[in-house]
Image (tube, helix red, strand yellow):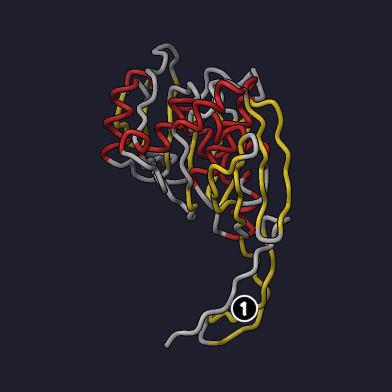
Amino acid sequence: MASFVEASFILDIASSECEVTQYQEGKLHQKHDCIAEETPIALVYNGVSHAVMLATALDLEDFALGFSLSEGIIQNASELYDIEVKKQVNGIELHCQISSERFTQLKDRRRTLAGKTGCGLCGAESLAQAVRYPEPVAQDGFFKLTAIRAGLKAIQPLQTLQQQTGATHASAYVTADGVIKLVREDVGRHNALDKLVGAMAKRPHCDGGFVITTSRASFEMVQKVATAGVAMLVAVSAPTGLAVRVAQACGLTLVGFARHDRYVVYSHVNRILSE
């Protein structure tokens, strides 16, 4: 019979060090390794727990705002009145005070999510809740190939936590001329994107650019980017079939397998200007 030990959570930091044994060039070496931390983060709205996600304990106010927007709990940032971060013994609670109208709507469709790293539609109570199609994206705006290349080149050195641990994803907001304005990291790709959406919502100048994700492009990633009103999502890995169909339907330009010298466009290629 297998034996189990109780795991302990480190609440305040994004990474920690542990002693490991490394095999290299035929020899064993003792060394210290930097590892990413994931912490249970509970999102609580007007005193009622709504979701628990495993996430990196960084940029938590951005996470609360971005999650609230991308999940359709609020329609704009002004409907989130306050965020209070409360550290508990076994995790962190983000207490969000939202408008009474939005809270009433939330109670009507309330669900509890058991968060897992990289999870997607965890805990949705119905198919209608699970697959929410975004509103059409505005059709204006064009992007040069050089902007995509510049963003892909610039994002790697800005991934501080990834460089330390090798275990995190990043989402970045890139201007139409290829300048990265915001980067957010997390052990979960959805969480990193939610943090970015929250950070963008606080900054009125984030308009007319696109988003890069260091992960694959699943349906939820397309949904979150389109809900934020961004016209293009560039992913370094592959999209799913549902992500492609939703991007085509809502007017989002979806790019996959993005590298400096190649990429694949799955929808609305007309936005990308050839050199």
Q: Which quadrant does the N terminus fall into?
A: bottom left
Residue at x 70%, y 57% (from the top left corner): 11
Residue at x 71%, y 55% (from the top left corner): 88
Q: Which quadrant does the C terminus fall into?
A: top left
Residue 7, position as x, y percentages in the image: 60, 71
Position above or below: 104 against 51: above
Position above or below: 14 against 217: below
Tell me: 92 left or right of 1. right
Furthest residue to the top? 140
Pick the residue in front: 27 or 206: 206
What amino acid type should be assigned to the residue bearing mark 1? Answer: Val
Residue 124 in view (yes/no): yes
Residue at x 53%, y 26% (from the top left corner): 104
The 10 Å Cα crowd at callout 1, few under 14, some 14 to 19, many 20 or more, is few
Tell me: 215 left or right of 168. left
Tell me the SS state at disc 1: strand
Pick the residue in front: 128 or 53: 128
Pick the residue in front: 183 or 149: 183
Pick the residue in front: 60 or 204: 60
Residue 176 in view (yes/no): no
Position above or below: 175 against 9: above
Residue 95, position as x, y percentages in the image: 67, 39
Residue 43, position as x, y percentages in the image: 60, 42
Position above or below: 151 against 208: below
Q: Which residue is mark 1?
A: 20
Kindly indicate the quadrant of the structure image that contains residue 178: top right
Residue 256, position as x, y percentages in the image: 36, 38
